[in-house]
Image: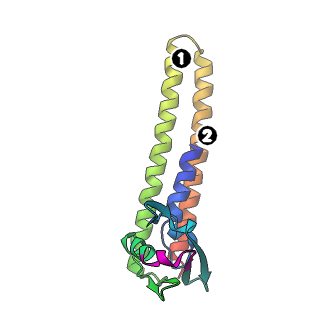
Amino acid sequence: MEKRVKAFKEELSHIRTSRASISLLEGIKVDCYGTKMPITQLATINIIEGKMIVIQPWDVNLVKEMEKAIQKSDLGINPTSDGKTIKLVIPPLTEERRKELTKVVGKLAEEARIAIRNIRRDILDKFKTAKKKGEISEDDYIQLEKKVQKITDEHIKKIDELLKEKEKEILTV
């Protein structure tokens, strides 16, 4: 369950808000030297005034490939380049786009909750099997069921907190 919460947190970091963030680039892979490498491992990345990302590749020959990778990504931002650096200006989100993003975030949160509930179900199934085989008593089963439910509730609460935090971030102008 903890892994699923971490995965949800990771998914949220890739969703764009009106602030520039290095995490926006983490999923972008660049064709270089015959392999695909994360852009974050091929350049120095800086945030300027919270509105612009400046990418300085360590090898200037990779600028064109980095531009292509950014354009192919789902960022929706066109890079500008002077041949040595790439600049990404993060435009402010429209009200409509903010609402869309909150729906996307809500959907991701629901998927995370479902995954946690599925984990709970799998664990309870194992306990039921153990109870049927006589490996654990009815009382132990009830106690374990309560513990699993408590842990499930805690993890769903974490998902909800992360969701509220991200929605607030998206809706802040």
The colour scheme is rainbow
Residue nearest the observer in this picture, 32 or 163: 32
Which image quarter: residue 144? top right
| Residue occupied by mark 2 | 151
Asked whether residue 167 is in view, the answer is: no
- Percent coordinates x, y for residue 148 in the rendering: 59, 34
Any mark on residue 100, and which? none
Identify the residue shown where x is 54% and y is 58%.
10
Check the image and name the residue furthest to the top: 134
- Percent coordinates x, y for residue 33 in the rendering: 46, 64
- From what the image shows, is residue 130 above or below residue 101? above
Q: Earlier in the sequence, mark 1 or mark 2?
A: 1
Determine whether the residue tagged by mark 2 lies in a helix, strand or loop.
Answer: helix
Residue nearest the observer in this picture, 108 or 33: 33
Magenta region: which residues? 55-64
Determine whether the residue tagged by mark 1 lies in a helix, strand or loop.
Answer: helix
Quadrant containing the N terminus is top right
- From what the image shows, is residue 143 above or below residue 95? above
Residue type marked 2: Ile
- Percent coordinates x, y for residue 128 in the rendering: 50, 21
Residue 61: say if magenta: yes
Identify the residue shown where x is 58% and y is 22%.
141
Residue nearest the observer in this picture, 170 or 46: 46
Asked whether residue 18 is in view, the answer is: yes
Check the image and name the residue furthest to the bottom: 82
| Residue occupied by mark 1 | 130
Residue type marked 1: Ala
CA gap, disc 1 to disc 2? 20 Å
Task: Count the labels in the image.
Answer: 2
